[in-house]
Image: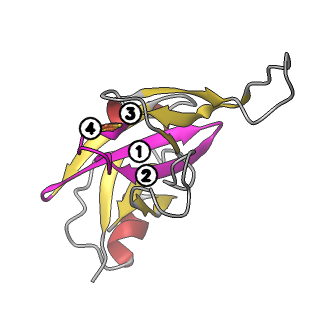
Amino acid sequence: MKQLHYVCQEQELRPGDRRIIRVGKKSIGVFNIHGKYYALLNVCPHQFAPLCQGTLGGYCPPSDVGEFRLEREGEIIRCPWHGWEFDVKTGRSIFNPHQVKTARYPIHVGSNDEANEAGSPEVETFPVELKDRSIFVEL
Ligand code: FES
């Protein structure tokens, strides 16, 4: 059965930020990309580097000679060991998106009470103001 696991308070993960958390034996990277949250397994499928510790940037799509376009700035993570690039939103690699990818996980944003009502007894609770919302990863 899948459960929700606490990541952090929403205000602690600003656009461009990331958190790396451990859930059991898994290391998970949680990202805020332009105000939306994404979670990836922190393992590169090449040689198992901690992918989510890589740099975030954009990528250059195919273009004409002499033309240079950088797109999707802040959405592409570059593996710290050998530079393979992955789309944080999908977990798919840039160079072979259908075969080379890392696992991604759903994110939920809500109160701790809502997470507990969803049947996740492992969620720790923290004293928060009513306006605060928490980020949870589901796996
Ligand atoms: S381990 Fe990630 S590119 Fe080699």
- Name the mark on residue 79: 3
Q: Which amino acid does label 2 sit on?
A: Ala
Say which residue appears at 31% left-offset and 79% top-offset: 119
Q: Say whether disc 3 or disc 2 marks the residue closer to the N-terminus.
A: 2
Question: Percent x, y for residue 137?
Answer: 38, 59
Q: Considering depth in this image, is 98 or 4 the residue closer to the camera?
A: 98
Badge 4 density bin: few <14, some 14–19, many ≥20, Cα 10 Å: some
Rendered-image quarter of ligand 1: top left
Q: Closer to the observer: label 2 or label 4?
A: 4
Res 117 → quadrant:
bottom left
**Which of marks 1 and 2 precedes in the sequence?**
1
* Residue placed most toward the observer, 34 or 117: 34
Mark 2 and mark 1 residues within 8 Å of each other at the beta carbon: yes
Q: Is mark 1 on a helix, strand or loop?
A: strand
Distance from disc 4 to disc 1, alpha carbons, whole Å, reads 13 Å
Disc 3 and disc 4 in contact, CB within 8 angstroms: no
Q: Quadrant of the C terminus?
A: bottom left
CA distance for labels 2 and 1: 4 Å
Q: Residue type at mark 1?
A: Val
Q: Name the residue under label 1.
A: 30
> What stretch of residues is rendered in magenta?
24-51
- Taking the spot 39% from the left edge, 60% from the top edge, the residue there is 103
Tag 3: residue type? Answer: Cys
Q: Earlier in the sequence, mark 2 or mark 4?
A: 2
- Report crowding for label 1: few under 14, some 14 to 19, many 20 or more residues within 10 A (C-alpha): many
- Pointers 4 and 1 in contact (C-beta within 8 Å): no
Q: Percent position (x, y) of residue 30?
A: 41, 44
Instruction: Identify the mark at residue 39; answer none if there is no mark.
Output: 2
- Give the number of the disc on residue 50: 4
Compare residues 24 and 129 and report the one nearer the observer.
24
